[in-house]
Image (cartoon, rainbow, N blue to C red):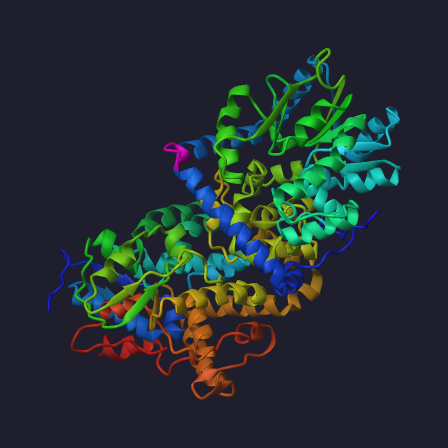
C-alpha cells in the first residue's frame, strides 16, 4: 500500500455545510479521515451553521447577510477552510462579495476578500493547494463521475476530481456521456420547478445507466441526493457516493456507504 | 387575423413559468424537436468558437464595448440621431411600445400603404407592431422563413434566432399546404423554402414600405445594420421606397470599427458560421439606390429603467445571438413558449422582468426558471454574467414582495419557512435543536428506510425521487463523541 502524505501539515478548518452535517455525516467523517491520513490537522469550529446559500439564491438575501457575517466570524482565524461541497464553497467565494455589497458593509467586504481565497472545495484543496493526486485509496467498483455545475463553472476545479479518481486502485472509471450537463437539482429549483427538474434528472439518469456503472460519484451531496433519489425510486440498483468517501476508502477497511 | 396568446409585454396577467412549463414538458414531439435542434447547434457552435485563438479576447472586447455604450448611452444616441439626419434619414424617439407603433403606423399611412414587408425583428414583436398595424387595416408580411411559418400558424416565436424551432419539417409541410394553398409539397427543406419563396416574391415587389429591426447602429456614421441568413432582409431594406427601422436604444455602438468585434462574435455564437451570409448596412438614403425615405425609430420601452440597475443593466449588452438558449438545460426541455415572453431562455429570464418591471407574477417567475448551472455565462459572446443577474433579480422579486405585498406576503409559506430557517441558522444551539427535531419529525414519513412522500410544496421532490431519512447521528455529534472527548 502506498502511504500517501502531502507536504507540510496544514491546520484545516472543516466547513462541513449544514446539509452534510445533518443528512450526510458519513461524508464529513470520510473527509476528516482522509485529511488526517494525509498528515493534516483537522479542526471543526462548532459555531458554524449554514453559509446562507439557499436563502441567497432563492432571493431571501437580506436574511442571508447575518449568515454571511457568521461564517466570516467563524472561519476567519484559519489558514485553510475545506468543504466537501463545490456548491457551498461557490457561495462563499463567488457570491459573498455580492452579499457584502448588498449589505453596504465595507468592513464585511474586506473580510470576505481576505477569507475567500482560503476556502477550498475538497478536490481542489488536494490537487491545487496540497498538490497531491494519489491519496492511496482503493475502491474496486465500476464507477462514473458527474462533475457538479458549481465546482465546474463557479470554482473551475477542472480535472482535479478526475485526477484523484484515476489514481484510486481497483477502480473502473467510466466516462459519463454529456457529463457537464446539469442534473437538474439547482437548490430550491427542484421544488419550485419540480417538473423541469424531473425532466433534467431523467436524462441524467439515462446517461448514468448507459455507463453500466454501479456507483455514481460527485463532489456535492445535494446533487447526489437528487440523482440518488431518482435511482432509488426506480430501484435500478445503482448507488451514489460522495467523492470524499471514495478517496477515504482503503484496501483493508473499505467504506463506501450505501445510500 | 389570429389573436396570439398574451405574453409579458401584453396587458394583463400571464401564467408563471412553472405553470406553462408543465404543458410544454408533456409535449413529446416538442421535446424531440427541441432536443435535436439545440444539440446540433450546440455542437456546431463549439467547433466554430474553437477555431478562434483570440475568442476570449474578443469576448472581453465585446463586453467592454457594450459596457461603455451603457455608461454613455445618452451621448451615443444623440450622436446617432445627428449622423442619421445628416445622411438624409429621419429619427423618431418612442418612450414605449404604443408610441413606437403609432409612429410607424403613421409613416405607413402617410404613404397610403395597406401592406408592408418585414425583416425578422424581436423589437417589433415586443411592441406587438403587427397586431397594431392590423387594427389600422395594414397587413404586415413576415419574410423570414421561420417568422413566416409562425405567422401562418398564428403562433409566437419560441427562440430568438430560430422562431419555429419547436416545429419539424412534417409539421411545416402540412402548414404550408393548408395556408399557402400548395397542392403538392414534400417535406424536403429545398421544397419548403421554394414554396415560401414563390409566395414572398410578389410581396417584396409590391410593398411600398419595408420594416426592419436593427442589430447595430453606428453613432459615428449613422449606419444601421441588419444581420440575416436568407436574403429576405436585403430585399426588405432595398426594394420598397420607404424603410422604417425600429431599434432598441441599447443597440447603438460608438464607431464603425467596433463592428469588427461583433461581426466575429455574433455569427459564430448564433449560427456557428464563420461569416454571416447577408449583412446589410445603410447610411441614411442614397440617390437612385435603395429606399428614398428612411425612418429610424428609437425605442425605450423600459430600457432606461434597466439601465438604472447597475447589476441588471448587463442584460442590455445582449447581441441576440441565442447561444444561451441553445446550451440551457431548462430551455432545451421546456422550449421558449413556457417563458411567455418574446425573449425566452436565460437572456429572457433576466431581460423580460426588468423591461416590464418587477411585481408581476408571470415575469417574476422567470429568474427562477434556472438551476443556476452557469452554462449560459460560459458561452455568452459579451460575457453577461447571467447566473449572477438571475440571483440578483430573485433578490429584487423577494424584497419587492416582502416590502409591497402586505400581510399576505408575510404569511406566504415560503417566506415563513425562510424566516424560520434564517432564525435557526443564526444560532448554533437553535441549529442543533432543529437537527434533533428533524430526526423526530420525519418518523411519520419514513417507510422502510426511505421517505416516499413529502407533504405540501415539498411533494414536488418525492414525486420522482425517494428521500433518505435523517441519520441517527449528525456529523457534529460524531465529532463531539470521537474527537473532543474530555
Residue B55 painted magenta: yes
Depth check: A40 or A125 in front?
A125
Visible in this render: residue B96? no
Residue B242: x and y in percent read 78, 23
Vertical arrangement, residue B423 with respect to residue A255, above or below: above
Residue B29: x and y in percent read 62, 60
Q: Is residue A74 left or right of residue B446?
A: left
Q: Is residue A61 left or right of residue A110?
A: right
Q: How many marks?
A: 0
Q: Quadrant of residue A89?
A: bottom left
Vertical arrangement, residue B44 with respect to residue B255, above or below: below
Query: Which stretch is magenta?
Result: B51-56
Q: Quadrant of the C terminus of chain B?
A: bottom left
Please report the residue visible at 47 percent of the width from the left and 43 percent of the height from the top. B44
Q: Main secondary structure of the magenta part?
A: loop
Q: Residue furthest front?
A: B184
Q: Quadrant of residue A237?
A: bottom left
Q: Is residue B52 left or right of residue B161?
A: left
Residue B386: x and y in percent read 52, 47
Depth check: B45 or B189 in front?
B189
Vertical arrangement, residue B357 with respect to residue B85, above or below: below
Please report the residue visible at 26 percent of the width from the left and 56 percent of the height from the top. A125
Q: Residue furthest top?
A: B287
Residue B74: x and y in percent read 63, 26
Residue A185 painted magenta: no
Q: Quadrant of residue A207?
A: bottom left
Depth check: A136 or B188 in front?
B188
Amino acid at each position: 500500500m502506498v502511504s500517501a502524505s502531502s507536504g507540510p501539515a496544514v491546520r484545516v478548518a472543516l466547513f462541513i455545510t449544514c446539509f452534510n452535517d445533518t443528512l450526510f455525516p458519513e461524508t464529513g467523517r470520510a473527509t476528516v479521515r482522509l485529511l488526517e491520513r494525509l498528515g493534516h490537522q483537522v479542526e471543526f469550529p462548532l459555531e458554524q451553521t449554514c453559509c446562507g446559500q439557499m436563502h441567497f439564491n432563492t432571493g431571501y438575501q437580506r436574511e442571508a447577510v447575518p449568515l454571511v457575517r457568521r461564517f466570516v466570524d467563524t472561519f476567519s482565524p484559519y489558514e485553510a477552510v475545506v468543504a466537501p461541497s463545490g456548491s457551498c464553497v461557490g457561495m462563499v467565494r463567488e457570491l459573498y462579495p455580492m452579499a457584502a455589497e448588498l449589505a453596504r458593509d465595507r468592513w464585511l467586504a474586506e473580510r470576505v476578500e481576505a477569507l475567500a481565497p482560503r476556502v477550498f472545495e475538497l478536490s481542489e484543496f488536494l490537487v491545487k493547494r496540497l498538490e497531491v493526486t494519489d491519496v492511496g485509496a482503493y475502491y474496486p467498483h465500476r464507477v462514473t463521475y458527474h462533475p457538479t455545475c458549481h465546482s465546474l463553472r463557479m470554482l473551475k476545479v477542472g480535472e482535479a476530481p478526475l485526477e484523484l479518481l484515476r489514481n484510486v486502485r481497483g477502480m473502473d472509471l467510466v466516462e459519463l456521456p454529456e457529463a457537464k450537463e446539469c442534473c437538474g437539482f439547482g437548490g430550491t429549483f427542484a421544488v419550485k420547478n419540480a417538473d423541469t427538474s424531473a425532466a433534467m434528472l431523467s436524462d441524467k439518469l439515462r446517461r448514468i445507466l448507459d455507463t453500466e456503472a454501479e456507483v455514481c460519484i460527485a463532489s456535492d451531496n445535494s446533487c447526489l441526493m437528487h440523482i440518488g433519489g431518482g435511482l432509488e425510486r426506480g430501484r435500478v440498483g445503482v448507488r451514489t457516493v460522495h467523492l470524499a468517501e471514495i478517496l477515504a476508502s482503503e484496501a483493508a477497511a473499505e467504506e463506501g456507504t450505501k445510500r | 387575423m389570429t389573436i396570439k396568446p398574451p405574453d409579458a409585454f401584453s396587458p394583463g396577467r400571464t401564467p408563471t413559468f412553472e405553470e406553462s412549463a408543465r404543458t410544454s414538458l408533456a409535449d413529446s414531439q416538442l421535446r424531440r424537436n427541441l432536443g435535436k435542434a439545440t444539440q446540433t447547434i450546440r455542437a456546431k457552435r463549439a467547433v466554430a468558437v474553437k477555431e478562434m485563438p483570440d475568442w476570449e479576447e474578443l469576448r472581453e472586447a465585446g463586453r467592454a464595448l457594450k459596457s461603455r455604450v451603457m455608461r454613455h448611452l445618452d451621448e451615443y444616441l444623440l450622436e446617432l440621431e445627428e449622423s442619421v439626419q445628416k445622411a438624409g434619414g429621419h429619427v423618431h424617439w418612442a418612450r414605449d411600445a404604443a408610441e413606437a407603433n403609432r409612429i410607424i403606423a403613421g409613416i405607413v399611412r402617410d404613404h397610403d400603404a395597406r401592406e408592408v414587408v418585414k425583416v425578422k425583428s424581436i423589437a417589433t414583436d415586443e411592441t406587438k407592431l403587427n397586431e397594431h398595424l392590423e387594427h389600422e387595416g395594414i397587413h404586415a408580411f413576415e419574410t423570414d422563413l421561420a417568422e413566416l411559418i409562425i405567422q401562418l400558424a398564428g403562433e409566437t416565436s419560441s427562440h430568438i434566432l430560430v422562431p419555429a424551432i419547436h416545429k419539424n419539417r412534417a409539421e411545416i409541410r402540412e402548414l404550408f399546404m393548408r395556408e399557402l394553398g400548395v397542392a403538392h409539397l414534400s417535406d424536403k427543406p429545398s421544397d419548403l423554402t421554394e414554396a415560401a419563396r414563390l409566395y414572398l416574391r410578389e410581396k417584396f415587389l409590391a410593398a411600398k414600405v419595408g420594416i426592419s429591426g436593427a442589430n447595430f447602429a453606428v453613432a459615428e456614421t449613422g449606419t444601421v445594420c441588419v444581420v440575416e441568413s436568407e436574403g429576405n432582409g436585403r430585399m426588405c431594406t432595398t426594394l420598397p421606397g420607404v424603410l422604417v427601422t425600429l431599434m432598441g436604444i441599447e443597440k447603438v455602438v460608438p464607431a464603425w470599427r467596433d463592428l469588427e468585434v461583433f461581426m466575429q462574435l455574433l455569427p459564430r455564437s448564433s449560427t456557428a458560421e464563420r461569416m454571416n451570409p447577408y449583412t446589410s448596412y445603410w447610411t441614411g438614403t442614397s440617390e437612385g439606390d435603395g429606399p428614398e425615405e428612411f425612418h429610424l425609430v428609437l425605442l425605450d420601452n423600459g430600457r432606461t429603467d434597466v439601465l438604472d440597475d447597475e447589476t441588471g443593466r448587463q442584460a442590455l449588452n445582449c447581441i441576440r445571438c441565442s447561444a444561451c438558449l441553445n446550451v440551457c438545460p431548462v430551455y432545451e426541455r421546456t422550449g421558449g413558449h413556457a417563458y411567455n415572453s418574446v425573449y425566452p431562455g436565460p437572456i429572457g429570464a433576466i431581460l423580460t422582468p426588468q423591461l416590464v418591471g418587477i411585481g408581476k407574477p408571470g415575469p417574476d417567475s422567470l429568474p427562477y426558471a434556472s438551476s443556476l448551472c452557469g452554462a449560459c455565462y460560459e458561452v455568452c459572446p459579451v460575457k453577461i454574467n447571467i447566473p449572477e443577474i438571475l440571483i440578483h433579480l430573485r433578490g429584487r422579486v423577494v424584497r419587492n414582495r416582502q416590502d409591497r405585498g402586505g400581510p399576505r406576503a408575510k404569511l406566504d409559506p415560503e417566506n415563513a419557512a425562510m424566516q424560520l430557517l434564517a432564525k435557526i441558522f443564526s444560532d448554533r444551539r437553535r441549529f442543533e435543536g432543529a437537527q434533533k427535531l428533524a430526526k423526530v419529525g420525519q418518523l411519520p414519513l419514513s417507510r422502510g428506510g426511505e421517505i416516499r412522500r413529502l407533504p405540501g410544496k415539498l411533494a414536488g421532490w418525492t414525486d420522482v425521487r425517494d428521500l433518505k431519512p435523517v441519520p441517527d447521528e449528525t456529523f457534529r455529534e460524531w465529532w463531539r463523541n470521537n474527537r473532543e472527548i474530555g
